[in-house]
Amino acid sequence: ANKDIVVPSLSNIPYQDILFIENDSENKRCLIKTNNNNYYIPLTLSKLIDNLDNRFIKCSRSYIINLFSSQLSIYLFII
């Protein structure tokens, strides 16, 4: 089961583990989805994308996806 973890920054999350990042504007935070955990970070998507490398793309106002994630296709049907 996935654990929900609040983190202050991206520094503790390996980029290769990130599947996607979802904006949660109601709570002024973002959900960072990995295979094992749900991380919540008090930053906007715009702030996050500035700190990510080029494997990530902001595909809508609400999502950043990891283009190199082999697991991402499983979640695309759920979103």
Image (cartoon, rainbow, N blue to C red):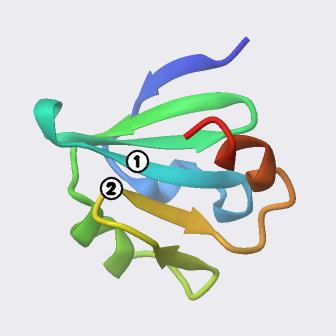
**Residue at numbered disc 1:** 22
Mark 2: which secondary structure?
loop
**Residue at numbered disc 2:** 62
> 10 Å neighbourhood of mark 1: few (<14), some, or many (≥20)?
many
Q: Which mark is residue 67?
A: none
**In which quarter of the view is residue 14 placed?**
bottom right
Along the line of sight, which residue is nearer the eye, 76 or 72? 76
Sequence-wise, the earlier of marks 2 and 1 is 1
Going by the picture, which residue comes out furthest to the top?
1
Could you tell me if the residues under marks 2 and 1 are in contact, i.e. CB atoms within 8 Å? Answer: yes
Going by the picture, which residue comes out furthest to the bottom?
54
Residue drawn at 38 percent across, 34 percent down: 40
Q: Quadrant of the C terminus?
A: top right
> 10 Å neighbourhood of mark 2: few (<14), some, or many (≥20)?
some
| Coordinates of residue 72 in the picture (x, y in percent) | 74, 54
Name the amino acid, label 1: Glu
- The answer to whether 21 appears left or right of 72 in the picture is left
- The answer to whether 21 appears left or right of 54 in the picture is left
Name the amino acid, label 2: Ser
| Coordinates of residue 63 in the picture (x, y in percent) | 42, 58
Q: Is residue 49 above or below residue 54?
A: above
Residue drawn at 56 percent across, 64 percent down: 65
Q: Is residue 27 above or below residue 41?
A: above
Q: Is residue 45 above or below residue 43?
A: below
